[in-house]
């Protein structure tokens, strides 16, 4: 008999990390702080429809807090950040799959509250204001969007009270505004940005990609190609970056451009022609009926 093989002994199944799913603030608190032991903890905020990009956030959170620390994933489709005619009703809701992915990548607790749990007094009368940083680019096309994002992020930071909160660099403007809120209003949390995850052909992962037809998906590749063309011109300065990216998008089939911009990440304003240093080259466009955003971080010389 081969060494170690004991036919009559029951096979040991590998230990599966299970996440506790909670729906109320009280249940969340009981699950996230089961005892008084002081351990590092981290939160990954999502609207569900989790994919490999979220998995990267959860893994980064787990790595940050270590085996002993605690990781929470929030799943809440926040009505405040959707404008009229946006896809609130149609936004994918896939909680069972989300829980599976979250626990597979190291979450201890999933907090999936109802709108009534998050906003028990109905629509909040007092909200966070993103200010000028929230009025440009995404904010120009989606007025009030970042006020809605900040309002729920502030609430979820209060509820989860983490040491670290992880957000994707794919939503570069959101990340910059959250970092600014935390700095300007003295929130006691470290905001950590995690690089965008892409398919092999360059398409940035997004929960909205599931709306793309095969043809739209092909057309959507024009966005990352334009960003990569801009990135390749980074050594020649801002003008060259803009020209290379916009030439790559010129005549792209099935793409209706909203903006293509080289951005100073500190205040999320358009980078001047003599800008040097770390910048965000960002694009937003409709591909078929689906609005997509993407960006790359580049060092402009
Ligand atoms: O990036 C998102 O999924 C959302 O904007 C967030 C941060 C979870 C707030 O609803």
Image (cartoon, rainbow, N blue to C red):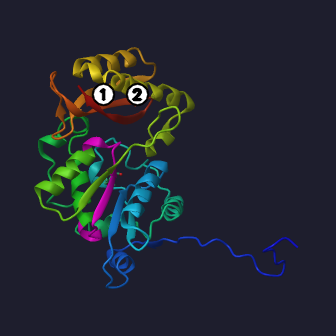
Q: Earlier in the sequence, mark 1 or mark 2?
A: 2
Q: Nearer the viewer, residue 8 or 286?
A: 8
Can you say which quadrant of the picture contains the N terminus?
bottom right
Question: Is 208 located above or below residue 281 in the figure?
Answer: below
Q: Residue at 36%, 23% (x, y): give it.
A: 232
Q: Nearer the viewer, residue 60 or 123?
A: 60
**Is label 2 in a helix, a strand or a loop?**
helix
* Residue 95 image position (x, y, % from top left): 49, 61
Question: Is 124 located above or below residue 178 in the figure?
Answer: below
The residue that disc 2 covers is 223
Mark 1 in CB contact with mark 2 (< 8 angstroms): no
Q: Residue at 49%, 49% (x, y): give it.
A: 52
Can you say which quadrant of the picture contains the C terminus?
top left
Question: Is 147 located above or below residue 14 in the figure?
Answer: above
Residue most extreme to the right: 1
18 vs 71, left or right, is right
11 vs 53, left or right, is right
Task: Using the rendered view, name the quadrant where residue 141 is placed.
Answer: top left
Q: Residue at 47%, 65% (x, y): give it.
A: 106
**Quick check: can you spot residue 184?**
yes
**Is label 1 in a helix, a strand or a loop?**
strand
Q: Is residue 169 inside the magenta stretch?
A: yes
Gap between marks 1 and 2 measured at Cα: 11 Å
* Residue 120 image position (x, y, % from top left): 26, 70
The label number, if any, that marks residue 117 in the structure image: none
The residue that disc 1 covers is 258
**Quick check: can you spot residue 147?**
no
Which residues fall within the magenta stretch? Answer: 158-173
Question: Is 250 located above or below residue 211 in the figure?
Answer: above
* Residue 260 image position (x, y, % from top left): 29, 26
């Amino acid at each position: 008999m081969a060494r170690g093989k004991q036919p009559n002994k029951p096979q040991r199944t590998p230990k599966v990390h299970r996440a506790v799913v909670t729906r109320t603030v009280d249940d969340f608190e009981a699950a996230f702080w089961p005892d008084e032991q002081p351990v590092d903890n981290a939160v990954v905020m999502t609207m569900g429809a989790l994919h490999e990009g979220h998995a990267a956030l959860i893994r980064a959170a787990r790595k940050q807090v270590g085996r002993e620390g605690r990781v929470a994933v929030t799943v809440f489709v926040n009505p405040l950040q959707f404008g009229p005619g946006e896809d609130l009703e149609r936004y994918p809701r896939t909680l069972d799959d989300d829980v599976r992915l979250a626990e597979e990548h190291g979450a201890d607790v999933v907090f999936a509250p109802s709108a009534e749990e998050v906003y028990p007094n109905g629509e909040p009368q007092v909200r966070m204001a993103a200010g000028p940083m929230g009025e440009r680019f995404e904010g120009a096309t989606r007025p009030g969007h970042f006020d809605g994002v900040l309002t729920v992020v502030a609430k979820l930071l209060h509820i989860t009270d983490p040491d670290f909160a992880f957000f994707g660099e794919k939503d570069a403007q959101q990340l910059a505004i959250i970092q600014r809120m935390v700095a300007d209003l003295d929130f006691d949390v470290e905001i950590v940005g995690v690089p965008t995850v892409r398919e092999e052909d360059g398409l940035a992962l997004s929960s909205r990609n599931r709306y793309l037809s095969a043809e739209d998906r092909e057309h959507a590749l024009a966005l990352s190609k334009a960003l990569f063309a801009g990135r390749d011109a980074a050594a020649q300065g801002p003008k060259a970056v803009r020209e290379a990216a916009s030439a790559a998008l010129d005549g792209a089939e099935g793409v209706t451009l909203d903006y293509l911009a080289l951005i100073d990440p500190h205040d999320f304003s358009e980078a001047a022609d003599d800008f040097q240093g770390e910048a965000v080259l960002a694009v937003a466009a409709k591909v078929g009926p689906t609005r997509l955003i993407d960006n790359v971080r580049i060092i402009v010389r």
